[in-house]
């Protein structure tokens, strides 16, 4: 739980969009789709506080530049981020609405996915 709080404090809308914009091509469409699905789920007022804490922890980990495997490491650089996002998606699956997935897909389409 302490890790969630630590990484949650790293999250902000601007840092999230900066990260996505700067690393979109390296991160890949699958990772972006997961990140945006979580983002739009967290922004929904119907999403529980617990689910939001999990999401912001995962997105904070995604944003932080120094993580377990640096994002600039070829091939595996985003694997730890993908694991964090996939775990969060599993944990909050009941909170994810079709509209969140649709918003995420629209957004990643703007990155050429």
Image: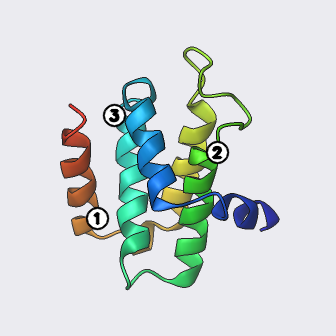
- Residue 88 in the image: state x and y as whole percent: 55, 58
Q: Which residue is mark 3?
A: 29
Q: Residue at x 63, y 36 (%)?
A: 80
Q: Which residue is mark 1?
A: 100
Q: Nearer the viewer, residue 26 or 87?
A: 26
Q: What crowding class fits label 2: few (fewer than 14 Cα within 10 Å), some (14-19), or many (20 or more)?
A: some
In the image: residue 82, left or right of residue 43: right
Q: Secondary structure at mark 2?
A: loop
- Residue 104 in the image: state x and y as whole percent: 28, 53
Image color mode: rainbow
- Residue 112 in the image: state x and y as whole percent: 20, 31
Q: Quadrant of residue 33?
A: top left
Sequence-earlier tag: 2 or 3: 3
Q: Residue at x 44, y 31 (%)?
A: 23
Q: Is residue 50 above or below residue 70?
A: below
Q: Residue at x 56, y 31 (%)?
A: 78
- Residue 9 in the image: state x and y as whole percent: 67, 64
Sequence-earlier tag: 3 or 1: 3
Sequence-earlier tag: 2 or 1: 2
Q: Which residue is mark 2?
A: 64
Q: Secondary structure at mark 1?
A: helix
Cα distance, mark 3 to mark 1?
A: 16 Å
Q: What crowding class fits label 3: few (fewer than 14 Cα within 10 Å), some (14-19), or many (20 or more)?
A: some
**Extreme residue toward the right, this view:** 2
Cα distance, mark 2 to mark 3?
A: 19 Å
Q: Look at discs 2 and 1 and give the one toward the viewer.
A: 2
Q: Look at discs 2 and 3 and give the one toward the viewer.
A: 2
């Amino acid at each position: 739980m302490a890790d969630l709080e630590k990484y949650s404090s790293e999250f902000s809308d601007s840092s999230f969009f900066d990260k996505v914009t700067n690393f979109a091509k390296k991160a890949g469409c699958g990772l972006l789709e997961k990140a945006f699905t979580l983002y739009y789920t967290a922004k929904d007022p119907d999403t529980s506080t617990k689910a939001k804490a999990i999401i912001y922890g995962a997105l904070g980990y995604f944003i932080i530049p120094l993580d377990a495997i640096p994002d600039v490491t070829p091939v595996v650089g985003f694997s730890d981020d993908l694991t964090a996002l996939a775990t969060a998606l599993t944990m909050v699956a009941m909170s994810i609405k079709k509209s969140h997935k649709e918003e995420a897909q629209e957004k990643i389409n703007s990155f050429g996915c």
